[in-house]
Amino acid sequence: MACGAAWKFQDIPLKSGASSASPKSAKEKEQRGGCFRREIANGRGSTRLQLRTEQENTASQRVAIAAGYVREGVQRGAAPTRAGGRHDLVVWARLADDPPGPSHRLLPDLPGGRLTDGVVILRPLGPPDGHAVHALYGVADVRASNARPDPIDVATAARMCGHAEANWLAGSRAHLAIVDVATGDFTGDIGLFHLSPVGEGMIGYAVLPPWRGRGYATRAVRLLTAWALGPAGLARIVAGTDPANSASQRVLSGAGFTREGYQRGHLPSAGGGRADVVSYALLATDLTDSR
């Protein structure tokens, strides 16, 4: 929004409550919690409240959602860091005529914070998973099947895990670890992404070589799709595999997906080319009909 002389701004630091220490400056207050910006139109009586949070500060983001604030985007390099650099801030806003109550979330939290079938657990990724995710995407066939054109280095993996909860709250991606119940070991990951307001999402998954051949990918896909097409309220989930990846195609078929077609040059591939994809889909009605 362009703001001219008719607007007054008032920053109101929001303390996150995570620490009992008193911040010594407005900058520290914003880094620990969030910072409200109140915009008042002279003579018109309308008010807009704005809250900015760090992407890692999901506690303040949950406060914003509960208070009815709507996520508006990310301001790049919006705040200084103590090391002398700049970091991004997530922007939330609430208008005077917004409806009461929490703002809508496209992706709800998992019941109890995880999904399990007694053999595997799916739990949201977090900062401690950075090294495991980097190792997973360093596996040659996982790297080759990844649609990202750039390699996932240590810093990228750490950022992916550090921002995973914020992305979940934003409704852009649910990224989870696949954990072996017996050992507690990280065995792979699974994600629900490319979510649309019309109720469609896409899944992707990868399993570390030592854990393959045990049905973990199929179990993970079943758990995630049952939640996504049930409590999360999606109507359709799509997936795609390399035409030569028969193992992944068996995973999708075993999880109830139906092959829908062959898409030529659908995704970017290593070296700047395009890769063909065999496309699959699972509908909420497929689960209902199978019961």
Image (spheres, grey):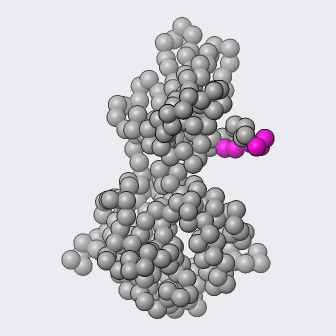
Question: Which residue is at a point 60% across and 61% down the rendered structure image?
Answer: 160
- Residue 105's place in the image compared with 284, above or below, is above
Q: Nearer the viewer, residue 213 or 235?
A: 213
User: Which quadrant of the structure image shows residue 149?
Assistant: bottom right
| Residue 283 lies within the magenta run | no
Towards the viewer: 49 or 236: 49
Left or right? Give the position of 78 relative to 178: right
**Most foreground residue, 83 or 61:** 83
Quarter of the image with the N terminus is: top right
Q: Position of residue 170 (x, y in %)?
A: 50, 49
Left or right: where 72 falls relative to 84: left
Q: Position of residue 87 (x, y in %)?
A: 70, 44
Residue 275 visible here:
no
Residue drawn at point x = 50 percent, y = 20 percent: 47
- Placement of the C terminus among the 4 image quadrants: bottom left
| 223 to 252, vertically: above or below | above
Residue at far front of view: 21
**Relative image position of residue 287 (x, y in whole percent):** 28, 74
Q: Residue at x 41, y 55 (%)?
A: 107
Q: Position of residue 235 (x, y in %)?
A: 36, 64
Residue furthest to the left in view is 291
Residue at the spot 58% in from the left edge and 72% down from the top edge: 132
**Any part of residue 4 in sight:** yes
Q: How many marks?
A: 0
**Displayed quadrant of residue 74:** top right
Find the magenta span and give its range: 83-88
- The residue sitting at the top extreme is 43
